[in-house]
Image: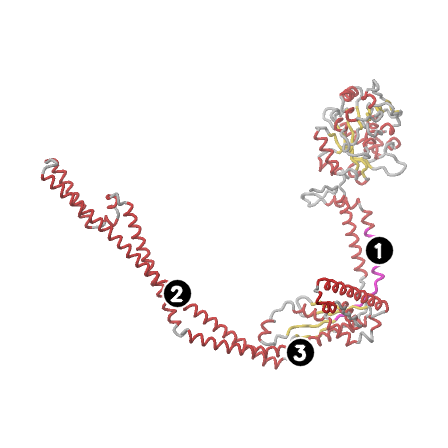
């Protein structure tokens, strides 16, 4: 769902980028809020800065690098370690190093009062008591749950588990060590092997002592780690070497037994012969497969043409047979001889009978030869099948033998590789054991002190200038952010640009909000005819007169989206401006629900529009407002059915009749968002003016009202933006009071 808000953050870019003038406009609108936020945050920053106890910072620098003169395994493993300095920094900040500092400087005895004051002791005691109480309650809950789910036979075990383990309280050394860790800072310098070790404290002397002591404690800790690690490594490698020696001997015996059992001495020669056999058998099998396929295709062709001798003889095997060629030539000659004899003799002549018998014998001979060729082809196919099967068996047998030999050879290779790797590992362990005995006293990390801590002369915290600048910046950022956030949350119409750009409506004018308890917008322009507010209504009057092409709208409806948006006051002041322009103006109060026009003009309301439309009077009362030149039809008593009365033909006829008598008819109606009276009246008028109260009318409400007006094809002449603040008004209205004063004169 799209969230519509009044702040007009632009949706696109122009040639100059974003329209930052709108942001500046928002900041000007909320300048007092921004200034207040900046003042509060800056004041809090000043108080916090000047009431904070000064903290002194002392730091030393050390060069830390790894000692690469180690054994082969360690050297290969530690060639590249990007986290080395970070690891050393964590060691420096560790609890062991802090406890060494406490013990070395005797901070728990000589400087106890500095670290542990009476208030701090009380807080720590209360904290420990609270933690002990919580642990006790947790143990009780744990015991209850355990006893609920345990078996009845395990009551003794349950009772033991339910015992509360006493919590040991921290000693002074532990508390001070934690405080040292809190004040300690370790920062490796980028792209170097130098580490800055700093410590901050209320006392500059304590800060210097602790900063130097941390360096020495770190060096002692690294030496102890090296010694303990070397002893453990030597012990572990000795035990591991024994295990690897036994394992190597066992693997070598297993490899020798495997070679003896599988005769692996001749395996390599057999492995070179078998691939040649496989290749030879494979080639023969391919040829046999091709021959079998050829014979099979030929037999299928013979079977397909068996009933057609002529088609059968056209097959290549028959067409190329020399015997069949000779028989076919003899048959051809015999047939020619019969044709020649038939010209001389009849079919029963002995010569013809002998020639016919000779032709029959030749055809029988041809059939016999064809049958012989078919039989020969079938025998060749069967022979090809038998040969193919034999070659396949030989190939399968050779493959099986090859796989068995390969499997044995692979197993031999695995066992030999395992023996070789274990031999290398055993030899490496033996070499490291000898080297470890020589270098166990050397440091694995080289540490040099580059700069010792000096006594700080000025406090490091608080940095007053920096804090004040940060407070000022944060206050400004918070104020601007809050202003933009409030503007973002504001979904009301506030300026002319919103209405024109978003809804495409013409803004006839904007009315500045009238400030002061003794000032009333209903009568303000009567007492101040040359004021900027009066000029605003004159601009609206001019815009109304120019809103139509041929002639100004004579019958105009004025309404708003909700109550208290100033539609009645706008209508009244607009009528006054039209009267000043020598126009005859009639105001019709069509708000039959909450009429206000009669009270604003100090006119009676016993009889009015509702009385005429309901038929209680024959003529609609038209009242002249004294000293103003305005004519008014009051609303009259509030009827039970305002919509039916306003939508009647009588109302339509009344407007038509009055329009012929007056130059301008201005109709006041109920708000558009509440009832449908306005939509009904919009069908009887030349156009409608919408009054919007800046900062009150929401975008959703105005959008819904516009949709209702357009659904009934109502003509909207424009919008009057009411209750605009002076900054918004000055951006829309131009001109000066003195200039208009001369015009009126």
Q: Where is residue 736 in the image (x, y as percent from the top left)?
A: 82, 36
Observer-nearest of 440 and 283: 283
Q: Earlier in the sequence, mark 1 or mark 3?
A: 1
Identify the residue at the far top of this view. Answer: 618
Q: Where residue 291 appears, x then y in whole percent?
A: 30, 55
Label 3: which secondary element: helix
The residue pinned by badge 1 equals 43
- The residue pinned by badge 2 equals 400
- Rendered image: mark on residue 227: 3
Q: Please provide the residue range marked out in magenta.
A: 37-59
> Marks 2 and 1: CB-CB under 8 Å?
no
Quadrant position of the N terminus in the picture: top right
Q: Quadrant of residue 694?
A: top right
The answer, for residue 509, to whether it is visible in the render is no
Could one spot residue 287 in this view of the protein?
Answer: yes
Structure colour scheme: secondary structure
Residue occupying the point 85% across, 61% down: 51
The residue closer to the viewer here, 491 or 448, is 491
Quadrant assignment, res 41: bottom right
Label 2 crowd bin: few (<14), some (14–19), many (20+), radius 10 Å: few
Q: Which residue corresponds to the image point at 74% horizontal and 36% vertical from the top-left?
A: 499
Q: How far apart are marks 3 and 2 (CA)?
A: 61 Å
Tell which circle, 3 or 2, labels the residue nearer the N-terminal end.
Answer: 3
Q: Where is residue 62 in the image (x, y as percent from the top left)?
A: 70, 72
Q: Is mark 1 on a helix, strand or loop?
A: helix
């Amino acid at each position: 769902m799209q969230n519509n808000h009044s702040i007009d953050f632009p949706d696109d870019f122009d040639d100059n980028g974003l329209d930052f003038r709108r942001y500046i406009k928002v900041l000007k609108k909320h300048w007092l809020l921004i200034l207040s936020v900046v003042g509060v945050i800056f004041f809090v920053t000043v108080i916090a800065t000047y009431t904070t106890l000064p903290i002194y910072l002392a730091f030393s620098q050390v060069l830390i690098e790894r000692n690469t003169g180690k054994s082969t395994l360690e050297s290969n493993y530690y060639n590249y370690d990007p986290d080395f300095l970070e690891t050393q920094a964590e060691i420096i900040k560790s609890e062991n190093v802090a406890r060494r500092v406490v013990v070395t400087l005797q901070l728990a005895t000589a400087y106890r009062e500095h670290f542990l004051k009476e208030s701090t002791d009380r807080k720590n005691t209360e904290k420990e008591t609270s933690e002990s109480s919580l642990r006790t309650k947790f143990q009780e809950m744990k015991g209850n749950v355990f006893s609920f789910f345990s078996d009845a036979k395990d009551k003794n075990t349950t009772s033991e588990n339910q015992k509360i383990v006493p919590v040991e309280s921290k000693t002074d050394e532990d508390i001070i060590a934690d405080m040292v860790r809190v004040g300690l800072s370790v920062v490796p310098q980028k792209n170097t092997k130098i580490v800055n070790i700093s410590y901050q404290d209320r006392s500059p002397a304590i800060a210097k002592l602790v900063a130097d002591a941390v360096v020495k404690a770190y060096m002692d800790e690294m030496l102890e780690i090296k010694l303990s690690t070397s002893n453990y490594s030597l012990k572990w490698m000795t035990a591991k070497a024994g295990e690897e020696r036994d394992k190597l001997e066992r693997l070598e015996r297993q490899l020798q037994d495997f070679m003896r059992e599988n005769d692996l001495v001749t395996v390599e020669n057999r492995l070179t012969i078998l691939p040649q056999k496989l290749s030879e058998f494979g080639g023969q099998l391919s040829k046999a497969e091709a021959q079998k396929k050829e014979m099979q295709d030929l037999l299928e062709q013979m079977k397909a043409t068996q009933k057609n001798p002529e088609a059968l003889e056209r097959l290549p095997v028959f067409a190329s047979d020399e015997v069949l060629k000779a028989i076919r030539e003899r048959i051809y000659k015999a047939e020619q001889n019969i044709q020649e004899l038939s010209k001389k003799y009849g079919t029963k002549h002995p010569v013809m009978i002998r020639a016919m018998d000779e032709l029959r014998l030749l055809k029988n001979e041809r059939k016999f030869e064809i049958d012989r060729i078919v039989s020969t082809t079938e025998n060749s196919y069967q022979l090809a099948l038998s040969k193919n099967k034999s070659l396949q068996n030989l190939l399968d047998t050779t493959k099986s033998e090859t796989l068995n030999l390969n499997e044995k050879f692979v197993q031999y290779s695995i066992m030999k590789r395992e023996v070789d790797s274990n031999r290398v590992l055993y030899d490496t362990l033996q070499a490291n054991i000898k080297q470890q005995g020589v270098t166990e006293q050397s440091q694995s990390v080289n540490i040099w002190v580059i700069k010792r801590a000096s006594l700080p002369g000025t406090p490091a915290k608080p940095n007053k200038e920096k804090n004040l600048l940060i407070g000022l910046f944060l206050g400004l950022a918070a104020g601007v952010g809050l202003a933009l956030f409030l503007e973002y949350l504001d979904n009301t119409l506030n300026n002319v640009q919103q209405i024109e750009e978003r809804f495409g409506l013409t803004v006839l004018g904007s009315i500045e909000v009238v400030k002061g308890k003794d000032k009333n917008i209903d009568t303000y322009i009567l007492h101040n005819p040359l004021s900027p507010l009066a000029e605003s209504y004159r601009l609206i009057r001019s815009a109304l007169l120019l809103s139509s092409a041929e002639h100004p709208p004579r019958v105009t409806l004025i309404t708003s989206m909700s109550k208290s948006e100033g539609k009645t006051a706008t209508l009244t002041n607009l009528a006054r401006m039209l009267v000043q322009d020598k126009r005859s103006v009639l105001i019709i109060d069509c708000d039959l629900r909450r009429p206000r026009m009669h009270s604003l003009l100090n006119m009676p309301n016993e009889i009015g529009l509702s009385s005429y439309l309901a038929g209680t009077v024959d003529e609609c009362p038209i009242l002249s407002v004294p000293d103003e030149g305005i004519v008014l039809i009051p609303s009259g008593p509030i009827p039970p059915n305002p919509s039916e009365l306003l939508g009647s033909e009588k109302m339509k006829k009344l407007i038509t009749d009055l329009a012929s008598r007056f130059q301008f008819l201005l109709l006041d109606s109920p708000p558009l968002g509440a009832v449908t009276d306005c939509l009904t009246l919009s069908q009887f008028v030349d156009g409608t003016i919408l009054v919007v109260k800046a900062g009150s009318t929401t975008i959703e409400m105005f959008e819904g009202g516009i949709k209702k007006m357009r659904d009934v094809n109502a003509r909207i002449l424009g919008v009057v933006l009411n209750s605009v603040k002076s900054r918004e008004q000055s951006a829309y209205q131009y001109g000066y009071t003195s200039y208009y004063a001369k015009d009126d004169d």
